[in-house]
């Protein structure tokens, strides 16, 4: 795909350069109008090449961001087997919150690990952490 964008950009640039050289050889504005059309077309073709380049780069960045987010999720949220008995269910500790955080976390949440936390007195007073919610989901 990169060859298409590069070809469009180079073609548009060559058309603009050719129009510039073409207009420099004629003296009357009426004769230069054809070259102006060639230059405008070259600008449009070059702009199309740049647009395709930016769209392809945006898609690549989006794909890379999704892959990184999935890797981070896999590191932070280990896969837990579906609990079948009460003994195999993960222990739910008290809800805690660290300083300057607005979400309530489980005590074993990786987002509050190693931070000074305090217990939340009213669990409904704060929204729950989405990472904690995903680890509890069956």
Image (tube, rainbow, N blue to C red):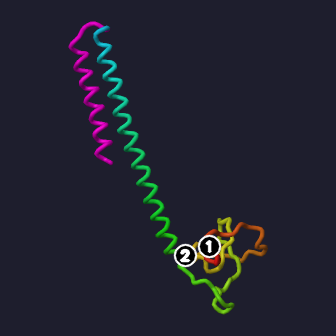
- Residue 114, position as x, y percentages in the image: 56, 77
Question: Which residue appears at 38% of the width and 36% of the height?
Answer: 48
Q: Quadrant of the C terminus?
A: bottom right
- Residue 93, position as x, y percentages in the image: 68, 83
Q: Which residues are magenta?
A: 1-29
Asked whether the residues under the numbered discs 2 and 1 touch, taking CB atoms below 8 Å apart as contact, a structural biologist would say: yes
Compared to residue 31, the image places residue 106 above or below, namely below
Quarter of the rendering containing residue 61: bottom left
52 left or right, relative to 130: left
Q: Which residue is mark 2?
A: 77
Looking at this view, name the residue that lies furthest to the left: 25
Instruction: Give the crowd class for mark 2: few <14, some 14-19, many >=20 residues within 10 Å.
Output: some
Front-lying residue, 109 or 75 = 75
Quarter of the rendering containing residue 89: bottom right
The numbered dot on residue 110 is none
Q: Is residue 13 magenta?
A: yes
The numbered dot on residue 134 is 1
Q: What element does badge 2 sit on?
A: loop
- Residue 82, position as x, y percentages in the image: 61, 83
128 left or right, relative to 30: right
Instruction: Give the crowd class for mark 1: few <14, some 14-19, many >=20 residues within 10 Å.
Output: few
């Amino acid at each position: 795909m990169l060859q298409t964008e590069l070809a469009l950009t180079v073609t548009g640039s060559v058309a603009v350069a050719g129009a510039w050289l073409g207009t420099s050889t004629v003296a009357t504005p009426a004769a230069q109008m054809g070259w102006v059309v060639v230059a405008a077309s070259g600008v449009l073709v070059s702009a199309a090449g740049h647009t395709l380049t930016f769209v392809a780069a945006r898609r690549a960045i989006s794909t890379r961001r999704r892959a990184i987010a999935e890797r981070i999720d896999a590191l932070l949220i280990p896969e837990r087997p579906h609990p079948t008995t009460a003994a195999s269910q993960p222990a739910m500790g008290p809800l805690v919150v660290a300083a300057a955080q607005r979400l309530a976390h489980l005590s074993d949440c990786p987002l509050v690990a190693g931070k000074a936390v305090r217990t939340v007195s009213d669990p409904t007073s704060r929204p729950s952490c989405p990472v904690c919610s995903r680890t509890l989901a069956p």
